[in-house]
Image (cartoon, rainbow, N blue to C red):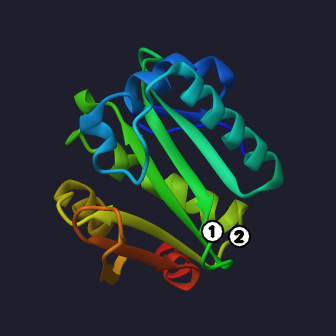
Amino acid sequence: MITPTETDRCRLRIVEKDDKNEIYRLLSDSEIVENLNLEIHKTIADTENMIDNYLEEYNVGTKYPFVILEKDTDKFIGIFLIKLDLYDEDCFEYTVYLDKKYWGKGICTEIMPYMEKVAFEKINTGNFRGFIMEKNIASEKVLQKCGFKLEKIFEVPGIVGKIKSYWKTKEEYMKSCR
């Protein structure tokens, strides 16, 4: 099991069923969902089903869904999901759903070192990857700042625009820890 942690401004813990209203608020917002490979949530049941899936897969070690809370107020900021890459068994990938009020405030850059530690030291993956829409410049800058390398740019049928894959190997992570 992964234990909760804190950064300078955030508290991170595993998602709970009681988070459904806050998660629904984010994932029913088309502006947030447009940069994710995810259907917009039309009902709270969509969110409840997603949370059930997250918790089932957390119990078997294929998904690690973290709630991001503002440390001083306990206000819900978003979700940081680490999940098994279905096309590469030695790789986990991540996705972030962040409240628009916190965009551009350095939250992802702040929590990324902890998420890397979870991926490489707790989950023990060989690689950690982030997929971003080509137009999502802010997320690309976070990955670059955190030492992730551009792996490839590709298109996916049904998704408008190109996707960039950034990744970091466990070897690169271990070098950065020295």
Which residue lies at the image location 74% right of the left edge and 47% below the top edge?
Answer: 58
Q: Amino acid at mark 1?
A: Phe
The kind of residue on which mark 2 rests is Asn
| Foreground pick, 140 / 4 | 140
Crowding at mark 2 (Cα within 10 Å: few <14, some 14-19, many 20+): some
Position of 93 with respect to 56 (left or right) is left
Which residue appears at 28% of the width and 46% of the height?
Answer: 34
> At numbered mark 2, what does the secondary structure look like: helix, strand or loop?
loop
- Please say if 54 is above or below 168: above
Give above or below for 63 relative to 133. Answer: above
Q: Residue at x 71, y 60 (%)?
A: 122
For residue 124, the mark is 2
Q: Please provide percent x and percent y for residue 57.
A: 74, 49
Task: Please name the residue that numbered disc 1 is placed on.
Answer: 120
Q: How far from the left and from the top, in percent, is residue 64? A: 65, 49
Q: Is residue 125 left or right of residue 68?
A: right
In the image, 115 versus 131, the foreground residue is: 131
Q: Are marks 1 and 2 in contact (CB under 8 Å)?
A: yes
Q: Secondary structure at mark 1?
A: helix
Q: Is residue 174 visible?
A: yes
Res 98 quadrant in image: top left
